[in-house]
Image: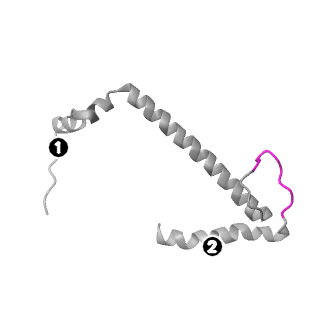
Amino acid sequence: MSESVPLSSEVLSHVIEREVGGWQGKLRRNPIFHLLLAFFVGIVAGLGAVAFRRLIGWMHNLFFFGQWSFSFNALQHSAASAWGAGIILAPIIGGLMNGPGLSVCP
């Protein structure tokens, strides 16, 4: 087994502050690149949030009303479910579907 050699602060600062050359170094120092990157990350995050909300509406409508619809208004109270008291099975079914996956991918 090889022993680890402690690194001096000079070596660490050289590794941390090393100058990146080429196009990567130019992009790191370019504020326009960071602005465009932040813009596109914001767009992707916003679209992801909209898609996630649509999926919540789809699951709500599918399990509560048996309808294939993505529309959902969280500010409006939902009508009684067509499943009646059997609606309690929806989270049980979801847990049974996710349970085996959690044991495979911890």
Q: Which residues are magenta?
A: 72-81
Q: Give the vertical position of 93 relative to 81 (above or below).
A: below
Q: Position of residue 43 (x, y in %)?
A: 54, 38
Residue at 43% of width from left, 35% of height from top?
Answer: 37
Q: Is residue 20 visible?
A: no
Which element carries disc 1, helix, strand or loop? loop
The mark found on residue 7 in the picture is 1
**Neighbourhood count class around disc 2 (C-alpha, 10 Å): few under 14, some 14–19, many 20 upward:** few
The mark found on residue 96 in the picture is 2
Q: Give the vertical position of 92 relative to 47 (above or below).
A: below
Which element carries disc 2, helix, strand or loop? helix
The quarter of the displayed image where residue 78 is located: bottom right
Q: Earlier in the sequence, mark 2 or mark 1?
A: 1
> In this orientation, which residue lies closer to the viewer: 14 or 63?
63
The quarter of the displayed image where residue 29 is located: top left
Q: Colour scheme used in the picture?
A: one colour
Mark 2 against mark 1, which lies toward the viewer? 2
